[in-house]
Amino acid sequence: MTPVELLRIFDLAGVAVFAISGALAAGRKSLDLLGVVVIAIVTAVGGGTLRDLLLDRSAFWIVNPTYLLTIIAAALCTMVYVRFRRAPEQALLVADALGLAFFSISGAQIAEASGTGGLIAVVMGTITGVFGGVLRDVLCAEIPMILRKGNIYATAAIVGTSAYVVLQDAGVIKLWAAVAGILVIVALRLAAIIWQLSLPVFTLEDRR
């Protein structure tokens, strides 16, 4: 599998899974069909669009409208599914964890292809993974996940993309480095969800 094919798979998987998480979030707010599709699109393309703007690239979904079709199809399929079967309680968080993993690694790969160094690849991967979820939560009148007290979210993207970059520097094949990075991100997010793991909270005491 070539790096281009790998990147394409991760990108499509990322937009599909983030579209699902966006559709589920919209459903929990009882939005109509248009609202569901809009939230799904914003969730799926938000991070990648910001990344492309920062890297001075054309937005990926404008260059290739297949992404929009994938997003709409994933959102509609999610709507049909939940009409007949109840979505699992943690479905939104699990879908979001998968989307975070796929998008973070694909974002890092795109940054690498643009000629950036490892540190910028980690930053761009993290932006790609988290910004769509931020827009989704803001539009759904929720506190964004990355701002919730002690929540391990962006941290998982940073650790996973860092693992991907470090493994490549150590000589690991790009495909396996990407798979390892994805597994790290998913494992951290799911561990945080299941065991309520969180980062230390910084608090200043009022000594007046």
Image: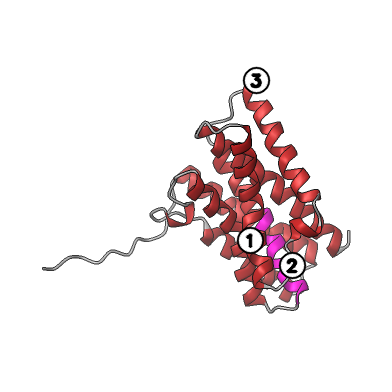
Task: Determine the residue positioned at 77% across, 61% down.
Answer: 176
Q: Secondary structure at mark 3?
A: helix
Q: Amino acid at mark 1?
A: Thr
User: Which residue is under mark 1?
Assistant: 128
**Magenta span:** 102-114
In the image, residue 117 above or below residue 161: below
In the image, residue 178 above or below residue 189: below
Disc 2 from disc 1: Cα separation = 10 Å
Q: Secondary structure at mark 2?
A: helix
Pick the front one: 130 or 68: 68
User: Which residue is under mark 2?
Assistant: 110
Q: Amino acid at mark 2?
A: Ile
Q: Residues within 10 Å of mark 1 (few under 14, many from 20)?
A: many
Q: Amino acid at mark 3?
A: Phe
Residue 89: percent from left, percent from top: 52, 32
Disc 3 from disc 2: Cα separation = 38 Å
Disc 3 from disc 1: Cα separation = 33 Å
Say whether disc 3 or disc 1 marks the residue closer to the N-terminus: 3
Instruction: Give me the disc on residue 84.
Output: 3
If the image is split into quadrants, where does the N terminus sit?
bottom right
Q: Are marks 2 and 1 in contact (CB under 8 Å)?
A: yes
Q: How many marks?
A: 3
Residue 186: percent from left, percent from top: 61, 51
Q: Is residue 103 magenta?
A: yes
Say whether residue 149 is left or right of residue 203: right
